[in-house]
Image: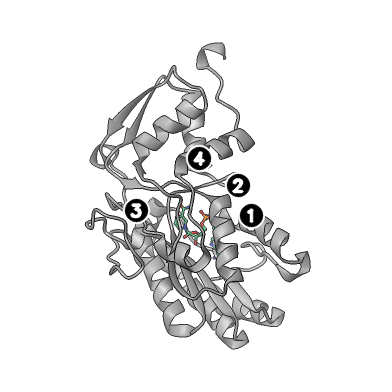
Amino acid sequence: MLGKNLMGVLHSSFSRDEVIGWDIEEIDIRKEDDSVGKIEALRPEVVIHLAAYTDVDGCESDKERAFAVNAEGTKHAVLAASKCRAKMIYLSTDYVFDGEKREPYSESDPPHPLNVYGHSKLKGEQYVQEGVSDFLIIRTQWLYGPFGKNFVDSILRQAGEKKTLSIVDDQTGSPTYTIDLAEAICELIQVDARGIFHVANSEICTWYAFGQAILKFSGVNRVRVLPMSSKELGRPAARPSYSALNCQKLKKETGRTMRPWSEALKDYLAAYRQPPADPADK
Ligand SMILES: NC(=O)c1ccc[n+]([C@@H]2O[C@H](COP(=O)([O-])OP(=O)(O)OC[C@H]3O[C@@H](n4cnc5c(N)ncnc54)[C@H](OP(=O)(O)O)[C@@H]3O)[C@@H](O)[C@H]2O)c1
C-alpha cells in the first residue's frame, strides 16, 4: 500500500533510474543470503525497507512468520545497508506503544507493545539501531491509500451491503493518507534526517468517528453507525486504546506540518473512490 505511493513520489523527486522498487516476487526478505546479495549488488545509497507481515491479528496466530519477516527480515536489510554503507530507512508503527500515556507519543517515549505485531516491529527497530549508524525509523499509523486493503475501502464496501455498521469507539489515533506519508518520507530523505521520527496526519479520532466521516464525506446518510467496544469486536490482537503520535520533530526537521486527517480523507475520496451504491437499488 505505502510502497506504490512512495515509488510515485520518489520518481517525481529523483531521476527514475535512481529509484528501484522491489516486492516479494523480486526479493524475499526472510532469505538472508538472497536478499543481502541482491541489495548489495545494487550498491544503493539508501535502503528503504517497508516489507512486513502487516496482518496484526494474523501475527497472533503465526508468531514465527511475524518475527521471520518483521524482525529477521529487517536484520537482513540492515546487514545489506551496512555492507553498502547506505542509509537505512525502516517503517515502524504506533503499535510499539501500549496506549497508557493518553497524550501524543513522542519519539523518546519508551515502547511497550501489546501484541505480537508490535513486538516484532520493535525488534526490527532494535536491529536497525544496533546495525547502522545512519538510520531513519519512521513510526506511522492507521494507513489508507489507493493501493491496498484498508479501513476506508472496507467501510465503503460494507455501506453498499448493510444498513447498520458497528465500529470500535475505544481506540484513538490519527488516520494517515499514504500519499501524505510518502511526501514526508521523501522530505526526510532530502534533508538527510537521522533517528526516529513520528509521521501521521494531524488531529485525532476513534475508528468510529473516522467511519462516520468516511460516510459523511461520501454523501451516504442511509447507513446507521453504532459505537462498539474492542471487547465486543473480539479481535485476537490487543490494540492500544490511545496511540496518537506527536509529529513536532518532523516539523522541526523539515518544516512540514501534517494536514488534518479529515482534509486528507476528502482528497482520497474525491480522487480515488466512488460513493457506494444504495443496496436498495441493487
Ligand atoms: N498499514 C498500516 O496501517 C501501518 C501502520 C504503521 C506502520 N506500517 C508499516 O508500514 C510499512 C508499509 O505498510 P503497508 O500497509 O503498505 O503494508 P502492505 O501493504 O502489507 O505491504 C507490505 C508488503 O510487504 C510484502 N512482504 C511480506 N512479506 C515479505 C517478505 N518476506 N519479503 C518481501 N516482501 C514481503 C507484502 O507482500 P504480500 O502482500 O504478498 O504479503 C506487501 O507487498 C510496513 O512496514 C508496516 O509495518 C503500516
Q: Is residue 132 left or right of residue 209?
A: right
Q: Are marks 2 and 1 in contact (CB under 8 Å)?
A: yes
Query: Which mark is first along the chain, 4 or 3?
Result: 3
Q: Amino acid at mark 2?
A: Phe
Alpha-carbon span between mark 3 and mark 2: 24 Å
The numbered dot on residue 244 is: 3
Q: Is residue 274 above or below residue 13?
A: above
The numbered dot on residue 4 is: 1
Q: Is residue 158 visible?
A: no
The residue where tag 4 is placed is 263
> Is the residue marked by circle 3 packed among few (<14), some (14-19), or many (20+) residues within 10 Å?
many
Q: Amino acid at mark 4?
A: Glu
Label 3 lies in ligand 1 vicinity (Cβ under 8 Å): no
Q: Is residue 184 left or right of residue 129?
A: right
> Is the residue marked by circle 2 packed among few (<14), some (14-19), or many (20+) residues within 10 Å?
few
Alpha-carbon span between mark 2 and mark 4: 19 Å
Query: Which mark is first along the chain, 1 or 3?
Result: 1
> Is the residue marked by circle 1 packed among few (<14), some (14-19), or many (20+) residues within 10 Å?
some
Q: Kindly identify the residue that appears in the image at 71 percent across and 79 percent down.
A: 42
Q: Amino acid at mark 1?
A: Lys
Alpha-carbon span between mark 2 and mark 1: 7 Å
Nearer to us: label 3 or label 4: 4
